């Protein structure tokens, strides 16, 4: 494979070897305007050369990253994700009030058919218990990110374990593990998650995380197993075997890293579904029973639904927030898939 | 005693619901220390399968390997998988055809060379990388310090093959198997790689099995040549003998199908008629009979035996090309 992407970086490196020689040659021949243009170009080349000189060219990952940066949809998705993560990290600084505190100014006007709206101190008004709705929205991002990321990572870790074992051993081990994942894949994701949560004696946010994680295990396992099997037949694995490399190193160093790309991309896409699934569970009242915890799914399900006639914003804001974040992760994931997929390389 | 002595090596592919296919049929040959032996033949004649069988790299399922592969007195086919793995890479090295796909794309070159050293010579990472640098230098890779950190897709094809050779020779094996090492390279690089191989083999005293379909490679490198057809050795001879006086009609056909600069203009290139698909099973006669110009009745009555020739080689043919007929 001759990678066209590596070429542009190679040539500036070569030109940077002796910039003074190039300079001398150009001076005098070119008219003054063009000369300045050439100078600017040269400066840019040197800059490029410096950026790539020490690191010894471009790795596959950086290659993919470069393509990702050129994709506007991916950038859009990444910006949403970045904004969301920033809000989540700095939630205590951004939120004007404590999300769990009930304010007298709000509770005194609170009745079954009146929930105080926006005021200068409470920009999004009150929630049904007299708490600051904006603060709860901002803090909700933390919960969403926490549940989504953790569920995805646990699912990824378990899925990689199962998939790697199945793909590395093949044969009956593979058969048993894959029939098991087939069973799990046959059930609708949300239904499976609900049954898993229902099995727990006391629901907490951890039951939600575990349930969502387990739902995603078979997807990762299948994906990794497939590419592991493909790696097993590859020339470089045969070459490694011909060198007497031990089975463990072959699996961990030669097969797994080459098989992981598809799984990593899937993980980004899974972040959005995990967020949606976690929100769905909370919406259905299967999430954390703690009423002080701010969580978008819970806010949408319990408060938003019940008081929809009184103040529909209570439902709109969490719903829109969930949709935007899920969209952000999906766009980023799609962009990553395109960047890594060799078929879309130009 | 020979370094490697292959006796009646047979590989049968058995797939469920299909007729067993004998890819390698009682192949015997031996390699002396420091010697270069060629295995020559067209696609599908069993060259690569022979090398994989020697290394014990054929999947256990679906393949039946019989015979003996005596390496330095031990039968590799009878070794436990773990013991065989210890020998692979340390006693026997192997170079594959496609240098890009034979290198791990996500691991820098240096680590890949170091890995073998760590595995077989018990070096730590630091010492192994230092040694790797010297190895890359020895196979003629310029600026080895930088190449150590680079990934396979960042270096050129010739350099990749050099890196593979460095990896194969890292533990100073006594036998090196090169499976079409120059096929994926262009002609100028081919010449460089062959020169390098020849030089390294001479310097280290490593024996070399050269698997190729390219007679030019054989002419430049091999001491003895085994010509394979349909999974059997059909002719074995010293290099000069083979090129000067090919006896088997197949070898003769191969040599006369090589274009020559001194042939008259306008002369058509000789070709062996038919294709491997025309082969008849060895049990029913000579597999080459349907494509052979010298075919006689005896060729369709059972496998011709491999018999010694007057010039010290072996030949499996009922009606060989007469010694007087030189290559056109």
Image (tube, coloured by chain):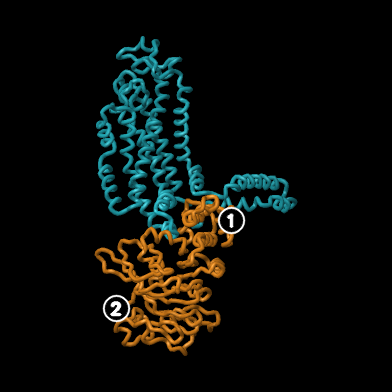
Q: Secondary structure at mark 1?
A: helix
Q: Which mark is residue B70?
A: none
- Marked residue chain, label 2: B
Query: In which quarter of the view is residue B316 placed?
Result: bottom left
Asked whether residue A4 is in view, the answer is no
Asked whether residue B101 is in view, the answer is yes
Q: Is residue A1 placed above or below A110 in the rendered structure? A: below
Q: Viewer-proximal residue, A58 or B105?
A: B105
Q: Is residue A40 placed above or below A86 in the rendered structure? A: below
Residue A64 image position (x, y, % from top left): 48, 46
Label 2, on which residue?
A: B283
Q: Residue at x 37, y 51 (%)?
A: A228
Residue B201 image position (x, y, % from top left): 53, 68
Decide: few, some or many residues near mark 2? Use Cα within 10 Å; few <14, some 14-19, many ≥20. Answer: few
Q: Viewer-proximal residue, A238 or B254?
A: A238
Whether the residues at callouts 1 and 2 have beta carbons within 8 Å, the answer is: no
Residue B245 image position (x, y, % from top left): 47, 85
In space, the residues marked 1 and 2 are separated at their CA atoms by: 54 Å
Chain assigned orange: B
Q: Secondary structure at mark 2?
A: helix
Q: Residue at x 33, y 14 (%)?
A: A114
Pointer 1 and pointer 2 on the same chain: yes
Please identify the residue farthest to the right as the structure is shown.
Answer: A28
Query: In which quarter of the view is residue B139 placed?
Result: bottom right
Q: Viewer-proximal residue, A5 or B211?
A: B211
Q: Which tag, 1 or 2, sits closer to the chain's start? A: 1
Q: Viewer-proximal residue, B102 or B57?
A: B57
Q: Residue at x 51, y 65 (%)?
A: B185
Chain assigned cyan: A
Q: Which mark is residue B144?
A: 1
């Amino acid at each position: 494979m001759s990678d066209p992407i590596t070429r542009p970086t190679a040539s500036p490196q070569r030109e940077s070897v002796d910039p003074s020689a190039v300079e001398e040659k150009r001076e005098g021949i070119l008219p003054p305007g063009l000369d300045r243009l050439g100078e600017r170009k040269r400066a840019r080349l040197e800059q490029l050369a410096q950026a790539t000189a020490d690191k010894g060219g471009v790795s596959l990952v950086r290659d993919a990253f470069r393509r990702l940066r050129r994709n506007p949809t991916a950038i859009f998705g990444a910006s949403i994700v970045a904004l969301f993560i920033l809000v989540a990290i700095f939630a205590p600084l951004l939120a004007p009030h404590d999300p769990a505190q009930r304010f007298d100014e709000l509770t005194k006007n609170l009745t079954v058919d009146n929930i105080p709206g926006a005021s200068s101190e409470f920009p999004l008004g009150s929630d049904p218990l007299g708490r600051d709705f904006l603060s709860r929205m901002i803090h909700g991002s933390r919960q969403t990110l926490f549940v989504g990321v953790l569920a995805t990572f646990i699912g990824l870790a378990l899925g990689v374990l199962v998939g790697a074992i199945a793909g590395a051993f093949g044969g009956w081990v593979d058969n048993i593990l894959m029939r098991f994942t087939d069973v799990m894949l046959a059930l609708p994701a949300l239904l499976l998650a609900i049954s898993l949560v229902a099995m727990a004696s006391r629901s907490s946010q951890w039951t939600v995380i575990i349930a969502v994680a387990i739902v995603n295990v078979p997807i990762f396992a299948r994906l990794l197993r497939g590419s592991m099997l493909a790696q097993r037949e590859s020339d470089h694995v045969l070459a490694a075997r011909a060198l007497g490399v031990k089975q463990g190193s072959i699996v961990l160093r030669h097969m797994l890293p080459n098989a992981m790309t598809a799984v990593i991309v899937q993980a980004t896409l899974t972040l959005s579904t995990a967020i949606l699934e976690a929100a769905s569970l909370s919406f259905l009242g299967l999430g954390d029973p703690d009423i002080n915890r701010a969580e978008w799914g819970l806010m949408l399900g319990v408060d938003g639904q019940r008081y929809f006639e009184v103040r529909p914003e209570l439902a709109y804001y969490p719903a829109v927030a969930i949709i935007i974040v899920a969209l952000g992760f999906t766009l980023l994931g799609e962009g990553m898939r395109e960047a890594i997929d060799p078929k879309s390389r130009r | 005693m020979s370094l490697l002595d292959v006796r009646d090596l047979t590989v049968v592919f058995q797939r469920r619901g299909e007729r067993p296919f004998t890819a390698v049929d009682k192949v015997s040959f031996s390699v002396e220390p420091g010697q270069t032996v060629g295995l020559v033949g067209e696609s599908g004649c069993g060259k690569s399968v022979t090398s994989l069988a020697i290394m014990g790299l054929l999947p256990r399922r679906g393949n039946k390997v019989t015979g003996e592969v005596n390496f330095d007195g031990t039968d590799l086919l009878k070794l436990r998988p773990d013991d065989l793995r210890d020998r692979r890479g340390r006693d026997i090295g192997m170079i594959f055809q496609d240098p890009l796909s034979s290198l791990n794309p996500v691991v820098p070159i240096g680590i890949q060379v170091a890995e073998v050293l760590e595995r077989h010579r018990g070096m730590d990472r630091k010492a192994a990388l230092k040694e790797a640098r010297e190895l890359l230098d020895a196979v003629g890779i310029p600026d080895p310090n930088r190449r150590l950190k680079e990934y396979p897709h960042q270096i050129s094809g010739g350099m990749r093959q050099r890196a593979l050779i460095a990896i194969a020779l890292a533990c100073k094996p006594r036998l090196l198997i090169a499976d079409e090492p120059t096929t994926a390279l262009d002609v100028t690089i081919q010449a460089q790689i062959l020169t390098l191989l020849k030089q390294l083999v001479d310097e280290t005293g490593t024996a070399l099995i050269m698997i190729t379909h390219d007679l030019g490679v054989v002419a430049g490198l091999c001491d003895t040549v085994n010509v394979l057809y349909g999974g059997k050795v059909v002719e074995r001879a010293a290099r000069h003998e083979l090129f000067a006086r090919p006896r088997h009609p197949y070898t003769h056909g191969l040599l006369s199908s090589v274009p020559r600069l001194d042939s008259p203009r306008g002369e058509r290139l000789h070709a062996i008629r038919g294709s491997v698909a025309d082969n008849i099973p060895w049990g029913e006669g000579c597999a080459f009979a349907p494509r052979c110009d010298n075919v006689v009745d005896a060729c369709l009555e059972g496998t011709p035996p491999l018999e010694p020739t007057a010039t010290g080689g072996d030949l499996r043919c009922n009606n060989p090309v007469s010694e007087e007929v030189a290559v056109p």
